[in-house]
Image (cartoon, grey):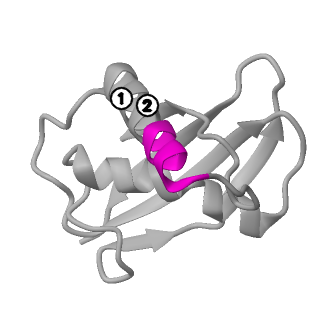
Amino acid sequence: MRLTLPLPPNIANARMHWRTRNRKRNDYEDRCTIVAGWSKDPPMNKARITVKLYTWSTMDTDNLMARLKWPVDWLVKAGYLVDDDPTHLEWVMPTQKIDRKNRRIVLTLEEVK
């Protein structure tokens, strides 16, 4: 299954009030729901996730991983995954590409038996 989601804000090194962060997160999750919707299938019990980020400029790998927190949490909330802990989700190292006009995240979920 392949999903294209909006790129979340880069909050890895940001300092903001908790209420502001919470509002931004809720706005982001609402946009994901509008773009991809809720899962119509039962959640995957164990999955492998491959992610490609299309960003404005090249980022450090640790900041890329931090930027994926909200999208992966949304996948659980929207019913695509049972949980995002290591027993239910295997990660393939995320990759990035520069695209200044259409910044986004492309997630590929494969069920692991």
Q: Is residue 8 visible?
A: yes
Query: What is the three-letter code of the residue carrying label 1?
Result: Asp
**Residue 76 pos. (x, y %):** 27, 55
Return the residue found at the far right. 57
25 left or right of 88 in image: right
Q: Which residue is mark 2?
A: 27
| Frontmost residue, 58 versus 10 | 10
Residue 23: give x, y in percent of width and height.
Answer: 45, 38
Residue closest to the eye, 112 or 34? 34
Region of the chain picked out in magenta, as a range: 17-25
* Quarter assignment of residue 2: top left
**Residue drawn 46% across the image and 34% down it:** 28
Number of other residues with Cα within 10 Å of mark 2, as a class: few under 14, some 14 to 19, many 20 or more: few
Residue at 26 percent of width and 67 percent of height? 83
The quadrant where residue 105 appears:
top right
On residue 30, the disc is: 1
Q: Amino acid at mark 2?
A: Asp
User: Which quadrant: the C terminus?
Assistant: bottom left
Magenta highlight on residue 30: no
Give SS at disc 1.
helix
Q: Is residue 78 above or below residue 87?
A: above
Up-down: is 54 above or below 74? above
How far apart are the two marked residues, 1 and 2, measured between alpha carbons? 5 Å
Q: Position of residue 50 (x, y in %)?
A: 54, 55
